[in-house]
Amino acid sequence: MPRQRRQKSSTDVYHVISRGNNKQHMLADDSDKRYYIGIMKKKAVKYSVEIYAYCVMSNHIHMIVKCDLKILSAYMKELNFDYAIYHNVKNGKCGHVFQGRFYSSCIETEAYLISCIRYIHNNPVRAYIVSDILDYPYSSAGEYFSEKHNCISDQIFMIIKERFPNKKEFYEFHNIFDNQEFIDIEDEKSEYDFQRIKFILNEFIEERNIATVKIVKNVPLIRNQFVERCMEESKMPRKKIENFLKMLKEST
């Protein structure tokens, strides 16, 4: 089947996602994330791309950028190509690092833009990596709440200042529940749900001094107690939790 043609934004603003091939953690190390952000900034200068927000996770990247659609394709192609070379040389590998083409979604309104920034900054919070957006060093959240702007365009700060009278209100805005739908959100929701079960499992094992994950999986009474706790805390259905439990490894 032919690839679906990208939609052009009337505002030239796009929400972009790149994923690791086969969901691999191609940005596993802190040094990898820093390297990617460095290339991201360098290529943005080269192509005159305005970066409004970003979050570099271990197996995917979120960005909000402003540029012409053709420029966006050239920018992302060169950015991911350069990082793929670095990754393969570092790890002694060859082949694809990213999962096909990057995803892009048009951002047509200012309200949607602001909500999308919040969604991106909350990625590591939803994944239970940190409890606060400012605790994650590989997103643009820190740039919004400091005087040092490493990658973020000055244009977006003008928009933020018009919307929020001070930084405190913009920070509190990040904690408001958002029911808007964003690109690829169903795929990400499943990933975050899985991370939440892992988080609860680690707490469960530590609290009860359980030796291994295998005990939780194979002892019916303990397994049932764990599943019921997950149901209470996450509100997920039993079947989904049990399926996630089967996927969990001993190293979790």
Image: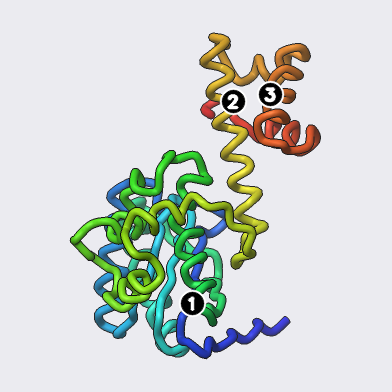
Which numbered dot is residue 233?
Answer: none
224 displayed left or right of 17: right
Packing grade of label 3 (10 A; few <14, some 14-19, many >=20) is some
In the image, residue 81 above or below residue 87: below
Tag 1: amino acid:
Glu
Q: Which residue is mark 2?
A: 201
- Marks 3 and 2, how far apart at CA: 10 Å
Residue at figure coordinates x 48%, y 58% from the top left: 60
Which x, y percent locates residue 170?
39, 59
Is 44 in front, or is 217? 44
Q: Identify the residue shown where x is 29% and y is 74%.
A: 153
Residue 123 visible in this rendered orientation of the protein: yes
Q: Are marks 1 and 2 in contact (CB under 8 Å)?
A: no
Residue 51 in view, yes or no: no
Gap between marks 1 and 3 measured at Cα: 40 Å
Pointer 3 or 2: first along the chain? 2
For label 3, the residue is 229
Calculate the distance from the C-alpha at mark 1 to the C-alpha at mark 2.
Answer: 40 Å
In the rendered structure, the answer to whether residue 9 lies left or right of residue 78 reads right
**Residue furthest out toward the front:** 165
Label 1 CA crowd tier, 10 Å (few <14, some 14–19, many 20+)? few
State left or right for residue 13 relative to residue 150.
right
Q: Secondary structure at mark 3?
A: helix
Q: Residues within 10 Å of mark 2 (few under 14, many from 20)?
A: many
Residue kind at label 3, given as amino acid type: Arg
Q: What label does residue 110 carry, if any? A: 1
Residue at point 34%, 48% (across, down): 134
Q: Report if the CB atoms under discs 1 and 3 are less than 8 Å apart.
A: no
Of discs 1 and 3, which sits in the foreground? 1
Q: Mark 1 or mark 2: which is in front? A: 1
